[in-house]
Structure formats: C-alpha cells, structure tokens
Amino acid sequence: MSRRDDVAAHWDDVVARFFKSEDPHRNDGELAEWFSGYAGAGRGTVTTEAFPEPYLGPLSTAAGQPRVVALGLNPGEADLRFQGRDGVFAGEIAERGFSQWAVTEPYLREPWAGAHRRNRYHEGLRTFARRWTGDPDVGSRDVLVMELFPWHSDKVTATMSPSPRLIDRFIWQPIAELDVPVVFAFGAPWRRVAGALGLPELDVASDFSTPARRLRVFALPGGQRLVVVWQAGYAGPPGAPDVALLTRALGAVAGAAKGLSTPAAQRAAPPLSPRAVVAGGQGYERFWGQLVDRLRRELPGVQIGAPRGNDLPMYSPLSHAKFKFNFPSEGLRLELLLTSTYRHENLAHLRLLRDHLDALQAAFGPEPRLVSEDLERRQRTQARLAVYLAGARVGQTARWTEFQDWFIDVLRRFHAALGAVPEVQGRW
C-alpha cells in the first residue's frame, strides 16, 4: 500500500470512529500526542464535537492526482449542524468514506453554501491553483489541502507545535509520493515546523507587492520544495500580483530548473537551443521532453513525474520507492530510489533487494549489472538499486536516440524483473 493510501485509510478509520461516538483524540496515542500540540483559548479553543478534518482534496490514489498541494493551519470554525456527530456531513461520509467525501468540494457546494457566507479561503485556494497552473479549469477538488492541526477552532490563538515525527508520517511521507515539484504552506507556523524538522533552507530573494508578506523555501526529502508564504493576520494564498512575483522569485532559485517554475511559465518559455541544453550542466528540458513523448507512446501504462534538472522521476510498483532516470557523473543511470524518510525502512528494503539480487539479475538479464548502493555518505535517508551506462553526457546530442533507447529498455526489464521475483513484492 502506498503511503498516500495508508494515511488516507487511517483517517477514514479515525473519522468513522468519531461518528461512532468515540474520541480518537483521547484514546489513540498518536492523535492524543498531536492534539496536545495546540492549546488555544477563547475563540481559539478546539472544538472536539466536530469531526477532525486533516485534509481536503485527493489524498488517496483512488481520488486522483492533485494539481496543487497546499498546507494550512487548521480547518477553521465548526458548524455542528454539518460537522457534528448528527450533522449533514455525517451521512455523506458514512456513504462515501472520508477520503472520497474530501473530493466533493463540500464547502463550495450545497447544502453548506446555502447556509453560510462564501468560503473565501477555499475559493482563494482554487483561484491560486488556477493562476499557478495557468489552467482556468482547475477545481477545488484538484487541490490537496493538508492541515498542521486537524481539529477545528474559530481562530488560532496559540503556537501550534505538533510532533515533527507525526508531521513527517502523516504529511511529508504521503506528499513525497505526489507528482508535484512544489508544496505551498500558508501560515508562519509552517516556518517553525520546517525548522524543527531540520529541512535545508534555500536562499530566495522575495519582493512582494504586499510589504508584510514573507517567503521561505526549504528542500523536502523527496526532492520537492516547500514554499512557505505568510503575512501577519492572514494564512491564505497571495493574490494575483504576488503570484506573479512568487513565480519570479522561485524562478530565480538556483534549483529552478528542477521544477520550481510554474506550469504556465514553463509553457510560455521559448524552446531551448541545443547549445542552451548542454550549457553549464543544466537545461535538460529538450532531452526529457523527447523521452517523455516516447514513453507515452511506447509504455503507455507507466506513470511519469515532472523532470527536475538532470533527472526524470517515475512511479514504481513498490511503495516508498520511485524509479528515476538521470545523468550522474558516471554517465546514464536508471535507479530504483528508496524514498522512505525512515532510514531503517530503506535499509530493510535494500537488504531485501540484496537477498534476491541474483534472481533479480537473472530476470533482468546479464547486462548491465544491478548495483545496490547505501547512500549514507551523500543522503542519509536513502538507498538505491541502479544500472549504469558509463561515459554518457547530455551534451552528446548525436547520441540522444541511443540514450533514450537505453532508458526505455532498462526500464522495461527492471519492471519485468520486479514482477518475476514475487518474494520482493510479497515481503516489501
């Protein structure tokens, strides 16, 4: 089971137990620890008579792929006519389950809309998503919003300091499986969470039209970027002028070629010349564009991620792992990268692959050799099983067809090898 589906199933169970008159925030050890991470007073007092809402949007794989991922603080004010144990949403969730209810745009449709003022927060997120992607058809159901604190309160009147371990498990890990290069966090508390988790910070210069607005950018373990935006008294997304300025700020980051620019900006960018493609070890866009076109034609069932600089991520059939094509210093590489944020889990998976390496190699074919690598010296949480083509460089444009043939061939054989050794998937 993917981490996305694992977390979605967990919250399905938690919400179902709430509607059975249980108190998961008291009798579930992890949730009790999470609940203790905020103690607001007055209008900030937590409402436990409303069901927890840890997220809205497509978290489970069955609910689809989000176009934009945003992190909020908490689900806001509760209306027990809808969110209480006998509320309107209780019947809807009983029929669908929470994870499917979460993609019905509940706060922008009836019956909620007829009983309340416009929900400016979710409307604002939808508008932001449309501006960021350049797609006017993006809906609220295409935006995955995950909360720092899953319980309701009218306001946030105290520091939210949930356990970094729980944020890692319930937020960072499922997000790492999503094909989004940028994760947005709206609200200053997310800056503290990023610091508490020890996320590396990137140097980004920002100049917003709203003087009080601030920006910090951090690197996430899965290779994505966490973009934290906030201003005093407001925990929502920026408006149109500042979205444009945000695009410019992120485009100026040294890692912008790794997917930080917006899809709209990418579509508007002029095609790179062959000289630009090979200049300074950057500008792999044309090569990956050609390869992606071939993959879609020749391997239509393969799920393809967004190119990031000199590598192209792909989905793998194993949880907490992804395939990646890239151009390291050694040449070309296809790697099965083990991506759990828990080092012991990656090493256990690496041992499993090593235990069956002979069988995997026999199913893969004699050449190239499968190489298992513990990445402790370079990236402490990861490991991989990889194959290499030595001496290849993206600047060798006359060999691009050869390189693409090699990538497609070894990907086919790697997939087949994993399927031919059932002990690997059975014990993963």
Image (cartoon, helix red, strand yellow):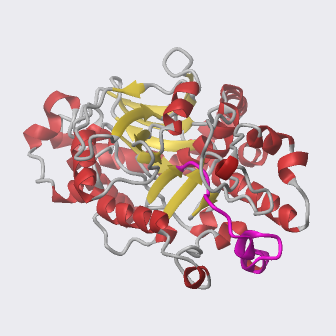
Position of 116 with respect to 100 (left or right) is left
Residue 100 is one of the magenta-drawn residues: no
Residue 130 drawn at (x, y percent)? 34, 66
Residue sitting at x 30%, y 57%: 239
**Image height of 115 relative to 333, above or below:** below
Residue sitting at x 66%, y 26%: 343
- Figure quadrant of the C terminus: top right
The residue sitting at the top extreme is: 377
Number of numbered discs: 0
Residue 4 drawn at (x, y percent)? 64, 53
- 223 or 383, which lies in front? 223
**Can I make out residue 253 in this image?**
yes
- 214 or 219, which lies in front? 214
Position of 260 with respect to 97 (left or right) is left
- 188 or 306, which lies in front? 188
**Can I make out residue 287 in this image?**
no
Residue sitting at x 43%, y 61%: 67
Position of 391 with respect to 359 (left or right) is left
Residue 348 drawn at (x, y percent)? 72, 30
Residue 78 is one of the magenta-drawn residues: yes
Residue 246 drawn at (x, y percent)? 27, 46
**Image height of 118 relative to 228, above or below:** below
Magenta span covers which residues?
A: 72-94
Position of 247 with respect to 421 (left or right) is left
